Amino acid sequence: MRTRGGGAVAEEWTLASAKRTPAFWLLNAIFTLTWLVVFMPMVHIVPFAVDLGIPPVRAAMTISLIGMAGFAGRLLLGPISDRLGRIPALGLCLLLQAAAFVGFVFATGLGSLYPAAALFGFSYGGATALFPALVGDFYGRTAVGAIVGFIFALAGSPAAFGPLIAGYIYSVTGHYSAAFILSAGLNLAALGLLLLLKKPTRVK
């Protein structure tokens, strides 16, 4: 029997047994790196757009664009991961998210900001949908709620500091370029760790 993602059905793990596998902590590290900066655009994209000379109403529409693209990412990346596999699909999301942050660095107006925002929303939405699916593939369905909840709490908590870091960088440098470059770098670091991720085996 096989999963929809193409791999064998996972053994059923408890949260305690999952914690004893290297894959569990590698997943936490991957999620922490990408989630540390995931809310940065949500908080700072409007003032960033205003700094580019975009009218406030059109700048605010960037948030709506991120939300709509995120919805599309959630819908499309699931079926894509069924064909490609969870890890390659998640890797694609991390790569696209890094590219979106680079796009923010080079944005000069609506014509370049909106595509970068849509790319960010799509990749963020897709990654959000794939993380729990990947955990389920690795550790089974019996305790997936407990395992996902633990990872989201541990790795998701640093996300609160991302906007603060971006605000500090802006206050020091007067622009967001360094914050966006940092965000792209962290997503690429997460992608590097993802390449090391292997399905866990039962610890005897």
Image (cartoon, grey):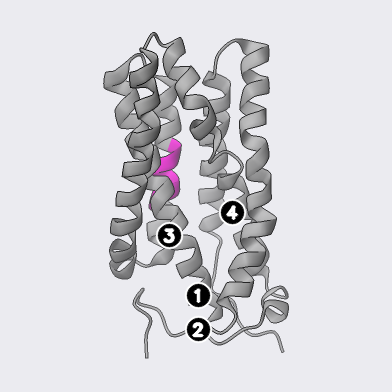
Secondary structure state at the residue bearing disc 2: loop
Residue 202 visible in the picture: yes
- Give the residue type at disc 4: Ile
For residue 93: magenta?
Answer: yes
Q: Mark 4 vs mark 2: which is more N-terminal?
A: 2
Q: Mark 3 vs mark 2: which is more N-terminal?
A: 2
- Residue 55 pos. (x, y %): 36, 12
- Mark 2 neighbour class, 10 Å CA radius: few under 14, some 14 to 19, many 20 or more: some
Span of residues in magenta: 92-98
- Mark 4 neighbour class, 10 Å CA radius: few under 14, some 14 to 19, many 20 or more: many
* Residue 10 circle label: 2
Question: Which quarter of the picture shows residue 100?
Answer: top left
- Mark 1 neighbour class, 10 Å CA radius: few under 14, some 14 to 19, many 20 or more: many
* Residue 129 circle label: 3
Relative to 44, is 97 above or below?
A: below
The residue identified by callout 1 is 136
Question: Which quarter of the picture shows residue 152?
Answer: bottom right
Q: Are marks 4 and 2 in contact (CB under 8 Å)?
A: no
The residue identified by callout 4 is 30
**Which residue is nearer to you in this view: 174 or 27?**
174
- Mark 3 neighbour class, 10 Å CA radius: few under 14, some 14 to 19, many 20 or more: many
- Residue 148 pos. (x, y %): 59, 67
